């Protein structure tokens, strides 16, 4: 079955592969059947976001992928440049004031001097001539910081990984944490937000609510070597975003699967996909 042109015209050729000699069925092979007006699924806008400082926000916009657009072998960094949405008008409204975000590159839009504090409600608006409009609302989460942090190489007999030791003081409320470990190379902003190569550890404070908590973990299956610089970040995230991340981690959902249709994962984006979330991460760069 072959797709032909933007109008969704599909030419279906019914090939009766009958090889039993003596039946004479080839004379009955029908002519190719023309099928028209098959609808083409319009890509949806996928939203990702991150606070880079207490007044600096970046929103990343990409489009969903069709079944033939990419596969598991696709390079995620090359793919991002291809599916980035660069024609959007993006704003964030908080405390009655609307801030326009500036387009940087590869679907990344940056907002400057947006005053953000824990508990602030923020409204996102995206308008794209090519892909339509989406909106979302989120609340800025209370930041939590590492008390101590250490990383060193760990050899399991085959490969070297980053072994991370940390301690944090948990606030006296229900909290959900995301810890990211990834290479600390300078790159295009949107690539860092999408985190196609990041190791993600999720943690909820049910057993240490309001206490000092310490832990050690290995960043497998991502390989690091002695002398590598890695970025380790701690973020206190919302319950909805935590549940979304948990599904992605449990199902080992990569960037291609995450952006491919059909997408059945939860989203707080009205009219689109992805997640608009604003948490203030504690980012540390460590040399193994």
Image (cartoon, rainbow, N blue to C red):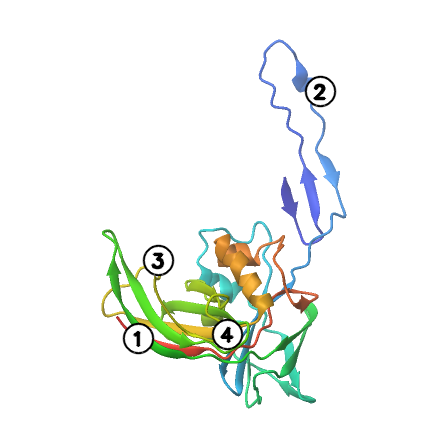
For this rendering, which residue is in front, 104 or 60? 60
Say which of marks 2 and 3 sits in front: 3
Comes first in the chain, label 1 or label 3: 3
Mark 4 or mark 3, which is nearer the start of the sequence?
3
Disc 4 designates what residue?
Answer: 236
The label shown at residue 129 is none
Q: Quadrant of the N terminus?
A: top right
106 sits left or right of 37 in the view: left
- Note whether 151 is above or below 89 in the view shown: above
In this view, the residue in front, 143 or 115, is 143
First of labels 2, 3 by sequence position: 2
Q: CA distance from mark 1 to mark 3?
A: 17 Å
Marks 2,4: beta carbons within 8 A:
no
Q: Position of residue 140 (x, y in %)?
A: 58, 80
Image quadrant holding the C terminus, namely: bottom left
Q: Which residue is nearer to you in this view: 168 or 247?
A: 168
Sequence order check, earlier mark of 1 and 2: 2
Residue under label 3: 220
Tell me which label, 1 or 4, sits earlier in the chain: 4
- Residue assigned mark 2: 28
Q: Picture coordinates of residue 4 (x, y %)?
A: 65, 47
Q: Which residue is mark 1?
A: 286
Q: Position of residue 15 (x, y in %)?
A: 64, 28
């Amino acid at each position: 079955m072959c797709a032909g042109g933007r109008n969704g015209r599909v030419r279906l050729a019914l090939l009766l592969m009958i090889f039993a000699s003596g039946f004479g069925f080839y004379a009955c092979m029908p002519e190719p059947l023309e099928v028209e007006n098959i609808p083409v699924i319009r890509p949806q806008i996928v939203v990702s976001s991150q606070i880079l400082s207490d007044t600096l926000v970046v929103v990343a916009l990409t489009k969903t992928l069709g079944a033939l657009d990419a596969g598991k072998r696709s390079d995620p960094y090359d793919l991002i440049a291809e599916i980035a949405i660069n024609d959007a008008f993006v704003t964030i409204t908080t405390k009655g004031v609307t801030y326009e975000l500036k387009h940087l590159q590869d679907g990344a839009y940056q907002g400057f001097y947006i005053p953000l504090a824990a508990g602030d409600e923020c409204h996102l608006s995206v308008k794209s001539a090519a892909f339509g409009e989406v909106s979302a609302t989120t609340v800025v989460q209370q930041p939590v910081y590492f008390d101590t942090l250490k990383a060193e190489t760990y050899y399991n007999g085959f490969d070297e990984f980053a072994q991370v030791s940390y301690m944090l003081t948990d606030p006296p409320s229900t909290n959900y944490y995301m810890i990211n470990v990834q290479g600390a190379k300078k790159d295009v902003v949107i690539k860092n937000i999408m985190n196609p190569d990041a190791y993600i550890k999720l943690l909820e404070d049910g057993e240490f609510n309001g206490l000092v908590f310490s832990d050690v973990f290995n960043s497998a299956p991502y390989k690091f070597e002695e002398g590598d610089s890695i970025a380790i970040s701690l973020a206190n995230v919302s319950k909805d975003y935590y549940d979304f991340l948990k599904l992605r981690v449990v199902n080992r959902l990569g960037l291609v699967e995450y952006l491919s249709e059909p997408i059945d994962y939860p989203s707080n984006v009205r009219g689109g996909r992805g997640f608009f979330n604003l948490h203030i991460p504690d980012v540390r760069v460590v040399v193994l």
